Amino acid sequence: MTTYVFDRAHVAEQHRCLAAAYDPLTFARLAQTGVRPGWRCLDVGAGGGSVAHWLAGRGATVLATDVQPDHVRPAPRLTVLRHDVVCDPLPESRFDLVHARLVLRHLPERDAVLRKLVAALKPGGWLQIDEFDNSYSPLLLAPDRHAAELYETFLAVKESVFEAFGVDVGWGRKVAGAMAAAGLVDVDPRVVVHPWRAGSPGVRLLAHTTYLLRDKLVAAGMTDAQLAAVREVMADERFLATSPVVYSVHGRRAA
């Protein structure tokens, strides 16, 4: 089975924060594909299931896959499947819409997986990939210089942990080119950056990462005291940063 940087057994809060922060963009872009009753949709790496449930709520028939799909609640028109997109096959020419959010960045085999997703599309079908580029997420305001340095140290150590697990932290900016190289047409990237303030979903997600990756962050050089302190920085009303750049990219298999 594919190894991920996150402990897949303790990600419920991560799923909630991801949904709160990024579902509005994901849903708006999915709506632009024209998804409607009768469509067959595939949601790869379904996580907490919010995207799969949204698609089913639009009347589509949805297959939601994940290596650990226990967090996806049952719903009408929704099938949930334990599936490793790296190792396990997908049916070809089956789906009107395939979606993957923050999945391929974790996979060293991402180019082969992308080709597999393209092959799963019907002629004329749409692929939507939502990804981050973590190389841009600057701090704008902090309580003091020490707080700023601590936050920036935390980001650097977190990215080093990700890279050690094969994550391409800049994958977002490469998605459009990869989709075009895989043969898709009408490739359309949209680029979004969100303000991150104390209490916002994105900041809650980042703070939760200090718990979820605690052992790996400590092994990479941070201390528990530093992790507690960086949580305090992110909870301060004087804190302001930008999110990673979010790329939501459409591409269509030629009819």
Image: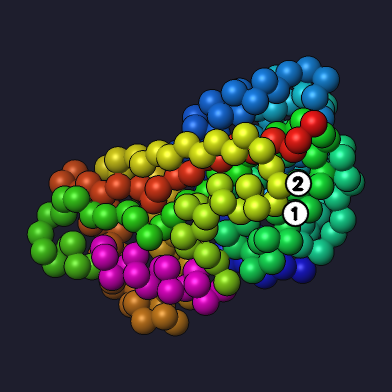
Image coordinates of residue 113 in percent, x first then y, are 73, 57
Q: Mark 2 falls on what kind of element?
A: helix
Mark yes or no: residue 50 visible: no
Marks 1 & 2, CB-CB < 8 Å contact: yes
Q: Which residue is mark 1?
A: 115
Query: As displayed, is residue 114 above or below residue 211?
Result: above
Q: Which residue is mark 2?
A: 118
Mark yes or no: residue 147 visible: yes
Front residue of 77/114: it is: 114
Q: Is 177 left, or right, of 181 in this rendering?
A: left
Callout 1, which amino acid? Arg
Q: Is 241 left, or right, of 21 in this rendering?
A: left
**Which residue: 41% across, 80% down?**
220
Q: Which mark is residue 76?
A: none
Query: As displayed, is residue 24 above or below residue 161?
Result: above
Residue 164 falls within the magenta-colored stretch = yes
Image coordinates of residue 159 in percent, x first then y, are 42, 68
Residue 48 falls within the magenta-colored stretch = no
Q: Is 81 left, or right, of 226 in this rendering?
A: right
Callout 2, which amino acid? Val
The magenta stretch is: 151-165
**Which residue: 27% across, 55% down?**
138
Image coordinates of residue 13 in percent, x first then y, are 52, 48
Q: Residue 85: which quarter of the image?
A: bottom right
**Which residue: 80% across, 39% down?**
121
So how many labels did they put on this image?
Answer: 2
Distance between mark 1 and mark 2 Cα atoms: 5 Å
